[in-house]
Amino acid sequence: MADSLRDKESGLKAVQVVMKIIKHCSQTFPTTATGSIVGLDVHGVLQVTNSFPFPHVELANSDSHHELTTASHLAAAAPRAKSNTVYQNEMIKYLREVNVDGNNVGWYTSAHMGNFVNPHMIENQYFYQKELNERTVALVHDVSRSAQGSLSLRAFRLSPAFMAQYKDGKFTVESLQKSGLSYKQILVELPLTIHNSHLLTSLLHQLPLRPTTLELALPSSLAELGRESRIAPTPLYPNLDALDLSIDPYLEKTCDLLLDGIETHYTELNNQQYYQRQLGREQAKIAQWQLKRKAENAARAAAKQTALPEDEWSRLFKLPQEPSRLETLLNSRQIEQYARQVDGFAATVSSKIFAVRANLLPDDGGAP
């Protein structure tokens, strides 16, 4: 299976990905799964011919919530770990020995309920774009969303503006206002199209069917054989689960995560306001001290004495350090992701309800 995506900004026209990363992400769920994707650049098209996971860290007593969280953090930081970098280079060398295209073109990770905009993801992608190639991509596979029957596989890259800001390491209000960077400019999502190889398509059309246990009546004529199909439907025949009118639990969980993200945003806002109050108090103390020092120097000048230095306030007073706005930017981007998911699910549920509205509302007798 392969995926193709187009990017007009950096010259990357397409990326093709082997779909076995979906199997890896599903097997390690709920722990975060990460791995490397390798391939070859052919006429501006990144053809990913293979992928392999990073080594899994075994922890004792992995049943506890604390151990699972620790394992997820270690797996999320695996793409930029030095030991995995060595492992990745060794794997690529072995792949080249068996005539497999072995150029590193990015990495992949799993996500749960669309929650993937976090510091680990940003640091990993920054490492790949800075150390390896600016055209490397990060593939995000949402296991929870895919379990609902809709494959979720998306490709992202850090924007050049965010790369420059992250390199400077300054995410203060002044620096963000100067650069004009917002949460919408953190990630660049690349449109992605999934297609199967011809061999796999042929296999899907030739899947063996389970023979029927009922006795079939023989057709009386060729015309009857043409009118009535006695062949069972294909295994990929769509079911009627999409017509269920109940609210999807995925939508309810996404709404809960959206509320948690809004609460986190207000917490960050309160921290910024607390910093502003602390800064205002310290600046008022500094201004008062400077006025007093100027009055002392005026009195000493009148007495023909040496003036005291007026820059000692930097040694006597310590201004509070401004908190980084990076967490706020990432949280805002994650809230936007949750809002898009809610919008997509709400549109689907609303269309179903309007489709059966006549059956849900009581009959008023005046309807035509």
Image (tube, rainbow, N blue to C red):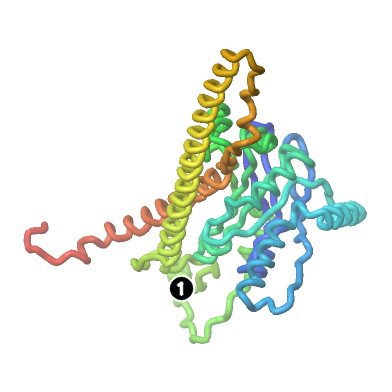
- Residue 203: x %, y % from top left: 66, 63
Q: Kindly identify which residue carries mark 1.
A: 221
Q: Nearer the viewer, residue 37 or 178?
A: 178
Residue 23 visible to the viewer: no
Q: Is residue 139 left or right of residue 368?
A: right
Residue positioned 46% across, 41% down in the render: 277
Residue positioned 70% across, 59% down in the render: 34
Q: Quadrant of the N terminus?
A: bottom right
Q: Is residue 86 left or right of residue 149?
A: right
Position above or below: 166 against 70? above
Q: Is residue 11 left or right of residue 192?
A: right
Please tell me whether mark 1 sits on a helix, a strand or a loop: loop
Position above or below: 106 against 112? above
Residue 362 visible to the viewer: yes
Q: Quadrant of the C terminus?
A: bottom left
How many numbered circles does the render carry?
Answer: 1
Q: Which quadrant of the figure has residue 299?
A: top right
- Residue 366: x %, y % from top left: 7, 59
Q: Which quadrant of the figure has residue 210?
A: bottom right
Residue positioned 37% across, 68% down in the render: 244
Residue positioned 74% across, 45% down in the render: 127
Q: Is residue 90 left or right of residue 354?
A: right
